[in-house]
């Protein structure tokens, strides 16, 4: 066990995948597990949201777990909040060596002030703040720092104790002042358990996000223990940004792929875009989740990509195709599947590309699938595909118009096409004003 883990607080360390690497004695005592038993376990087995699974299976719900991510390990600091408050109330000195910054405050002046105010304004401090928003500064200047623990003194947050003591709130952002206002109102209304997050401007670092848990005791004293949430928040923000970036790039790739066919066959490129728009609307109306709708849109945008492998003469042939030419065209789902199969698409995308010409009665291709073997996602694109193809101009015929297209799907409703999809599609055009752009 690492020497630097010898704290009263329970500490558990995992790798980024959640595999437990280490823990301290306090954690062994708390959980009843020995470190060597924990080594092969997953963090999920031990800690769930706000709960801790101990050896005898008890779940303790009053523990707070704060994961900090540093150098490819995750440090879980587990606090028994009730116990900490007891210790704080007994003697701050016990926490001199604690691995978190702790501040002891003298509240006497503030409490006297609030008591005087209560005689004048009664219970309504909130209204008082609306009338006198600046009064918050009078309130907070009445708080006095008595002492801080060693961890704080070292300048943990970029402030030395002396600098911090000069003016406790100089570094607060305007938003934090509002939060303090809210917390003072809560305190005024009798709440003694204050637990909130503040933004502090650290001159050496920038904005820091600090969780402050305040214990008020002996009526006139308070202890704040502070947990730095900045890294945690940054990581969450970075992750969100990375996901958004990935989504952006994959959308770009799909659009590029979809338009690859444009040079060769501009009908197909426009057709895919319009089928994708209609499929998306149908999927939304049916109530698919956003992820499913996105996958269906992507699949529809690429559904005829396999036509890239078919000669332009056949694709753009003005007259009727010969049986052989038609057999060649019918290979496009498989060709499309082959082009895309090595890309890590959601499974619906390949399913749509491969099966969009299947029909419920088994008359489709390439596999002649029936009913239950055809997914609803595929069924949506099949309907959108037929409607768009009939409504639009084709090299071999003028447009048949949307009414003819809708009668066609109506005719085969429940036979070739899913009933629900047909109903939704017709409703979109007839009642909800959908138009191909
Ligand atoms: Fe197709
Ligand atoms: Fe198509």
Image (cartoon, rainbow, N blue to C red):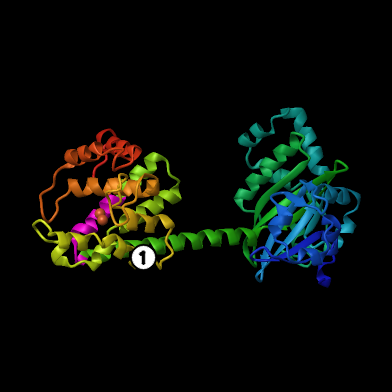
Q: Can residue 168 be seen in this snapshot?
A: no
Q: Residue at x 35, y 52 (%)?
A: 297
Seen in the image, is 3 located left or right of residue 179? right
Highlighted range, magenta: 263-276
Farthest right residue in view: 90
Q: Position of residue 44 (x, y in %)?
A: 69, 56
Residue 182: give x, y in percent of width and height: 67, 41
Which residue is located at x 85 percent, y 63 percent?
25
Q: Is residue 268 left or right of residue 214?
A: left
Report whether residue 417 is seen: yes
Q: Quadrant of ligand 1?
A: bottom left
For residue 177, above or below residue 118: below
* 135 left or right of 92 in image: left
Q: Is residue 363 above or below residue 28?
A: above
Residue 254 vertical position relative to residue 193 in the rendered view, above or below: below
Q: Main secondary structure of the magenta part?
A: helix
Mark 1 lies on a secondary structure that is helix
Quarter that holds the N terminus: bottom right
Question: Where does the image place residue 117, in percent across and percent down from the top left?
Answer: 75, 33
Where is mark 1, residue-wise?
340
Check if residue 63 falls in the magenta segment.
Answer: no
Q: Residue at x 31, y 38 (%)?
A: 414
x then y, percent, for residue 27: 82, 60
Q: Which is nearer the eye, 321 or 284?
A: 321
């Amino acid at each position: 066990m690492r020497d630097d883990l010898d704290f009263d607080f329970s500490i558990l360390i995992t790798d980024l995948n959640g595999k437990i690497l280490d823990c301290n004695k306090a954690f062994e005592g708390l959980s009843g597990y020995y470190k060597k038993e924990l080594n092969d376990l997953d963090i999920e087995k031990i800690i769930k949201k706000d709960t801790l699974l101990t050896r005898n299976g008890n779940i303790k719900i009053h523990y707070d777990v704060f994961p900090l991510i540093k150098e490819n390990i995750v440090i879980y600091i587990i606090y028994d909040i009730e116990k900490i408050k007891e210790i704080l109330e007994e003697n701050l000195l016990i926490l001199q060596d604690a691995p978190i910054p702790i501040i002891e405050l003298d509240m006497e002046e503030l409490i006297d002030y609030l008591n005087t105010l209560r005689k004048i304004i009664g219970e309504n401090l909130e209204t008082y703040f609306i009338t006198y928003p600046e009064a918050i500064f009078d309130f907070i200047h009445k708080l006095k720092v008595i002492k801080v623990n060693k961890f704080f003194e070292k300048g943990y947050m970029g402030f030395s104790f002396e600098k911090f003591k000069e003016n406790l709130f100089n570094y607060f952002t305007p938003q934090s002042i509002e939060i303090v206002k809210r917390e003072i109102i809560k305190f005024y209304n009798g709440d003694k358990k204050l637990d909130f997050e503040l933004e502090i401007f650290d001159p050496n670092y920038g904005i820091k996000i600090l969780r402050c848990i305040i214990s008020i005791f002996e009526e006139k004293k308070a202890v704040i223990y502070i947990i730095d949430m900045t890294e945690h928040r940054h990581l969450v923000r970075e992750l969100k940004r990375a996901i958004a970036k990935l989504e952006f790039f994959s959308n770009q790739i799909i659009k590029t792929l979809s338009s690859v066919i444009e040079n060769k066959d501009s009908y197909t490129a426009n057709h895919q875009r319009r089928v994708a728009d209609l499929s998306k609307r149908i999927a939304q109306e049916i109530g698919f989740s956003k992820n499913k709708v996105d996958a269906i849109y992507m699949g529809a945008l690429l559904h005829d990509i396999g036509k890239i492998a078919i000669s332009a003469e056949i694709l753009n042939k003005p007259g009727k195709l010969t049986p052989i030419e038609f057999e060649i065209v019918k290979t496009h789902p498989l060709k499309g599947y082959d082009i895309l199969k090595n890309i890590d698409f959601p499974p619906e995308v390949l399913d749509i590309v491969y099966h969009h010409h299947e029909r419920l009665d088994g008359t489709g291709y390439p596999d002649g699938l029936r009913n239950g073997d055809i997914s609803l996602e595929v069924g949506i694109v099949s309907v959108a595909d037929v409607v768009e193809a009939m409504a639009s101009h084709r090299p071999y015929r003028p447009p048949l118009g949307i009414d003819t297209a809708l009668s066609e799907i109506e005719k085969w409703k429940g036979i070739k096409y899913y009933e629900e999809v047909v109903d939704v599609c017709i409703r979109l055009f007839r009642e909800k004003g959908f138009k191909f752009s």
